[in-house]
Amino acid sequence: MTVTDRRRRSRGKFGVGVSLGEVALHANVSTASVSRVLNNSANVSDEVRQRVELACRELGYVPNGVARALAANKTMTIGAIVPAIENAGIAAAVAAFQRTLKQAGYTMLLTSSNYDEEAEFQEARTLLSRGVDGLMLVGGEHHPDLISLITHHQVPYIETWTLSAGRPSVGLDNLGAARMLTRHLIALGHKRIALIMGRVAGNDRAALRVQGVRECLADHGLPPPQEYLIGRPYNIPDIREAMQSLLAEEARPTALICGNDQIAFGSMIEASKQGLNVPADMSIAGFNDLEFSAHLNPPLTTIRVPTEDIGRISAEFLLKSIEHKGFVTDAVEIPATLVARESTAAPPASASGI
């Protein structure tokens, strides 16, 4: 094979140097039709769309993203900065966020801050330097300069999983949801209630949930919760270690509220390991209502958070802001609801008094 032949094969495989006109010729359509297909225009027939897409595949054509971005003054990319990838609730929201963007022809760039405000700020700077058309953030507490940086670049942003007055946000009332779950346990007769949370530092969502539990207990004249925090990534060994510390207490709680369903799952594993029956010996409740929660043994009582709605609506907000070249400042509350299942029940008869 000659050098020229190799170049031709490489050109066909990777689309190097393939022009819009060559795609049009290969598909036997006009260049205008090719352009409409590549721009996801509705003004093109299914037959033409299929011919153009086939020609692109056969020629290995890849649109010149830089040129298209300059022409449209858009990069068709949106950045998403999340605190942790291993959080299943956030992962589900991000997946819905990406699906919605993809349907509109946008690409998501995902990065993680590991619950560090400085890291989040630096990631935002990097994404803004790449020319993203919008930013999705998690929570309402950030580096003091972050929002100023974003608005200085005139880039739309949305805060998720929280409700921020005067800022664009899509989320739930974390404090109110925690109070709802605590009231459920109090109504069952529990007076000694404990908490196992994830990271609270740099996590205003978790902090609000802790606050909600404390306030609800105080409103009912009950002692504050025994609190155990997991400052590391959510994994079963760390959760079980926290549960071991909790169960070693002399006045063992009769009910446990977990910061999310993953923590509840790990707590149930350790409870079973130590010979406890859930809920006869201890009630356990979670937060988020992940898919597996209804299939645990026993099925988990939890707060249902429509995570996919958070992702979808957040993407729609950003797309609307980009389209109208303006900033949407509304706060959209996603309703959280209590799902009472078999992991919570009345406390054991032996647990009398406080």
Image (cartoon, rainbow, N blue to C red):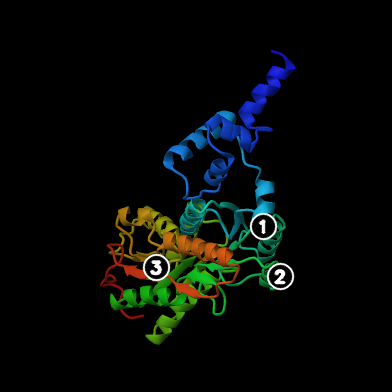
Of the two numbered discs 3 and 2 on the same chain, state the one appearing first in sequence. 2
Amino acid carrying mark 2 in the image? His
Q: Which residue is mark 2?
A: 152
The residue identified by callout 3 is 256
Q: Residue furthest front?
A: 30
Label 2: element kind: helix
Q: Residue at 59%, 71% (x, y): give it.
A: 327
Give the mark nearer the N terminus: 1 vs 3.
Answer: 1
How far from the left and from the top, in percent, is residue 109? 60, 52
Q: Nearer the viewer, mark 1 or mark 3?
A: 1
Report the Cα–Cα distance between label 3 and label 2. 45 Å
Residues under labels 2 and 1: Cα distance?
A: 17 Å
> Tag 1, which secondary structure?
loop
Query: 66 or 220: nearer the eye?
Result: 66
Mark number, residue 73: 1
Residue 173, picture quadrant: bottom left
- Say few, some or many: other residues with alpha carbon within 10 Å of mark 3 (under 14 / 14 to 19 / 20 or more): many
Amino acid carrying label 3: it is Leu
Q: Residue furthest top?
A: 1
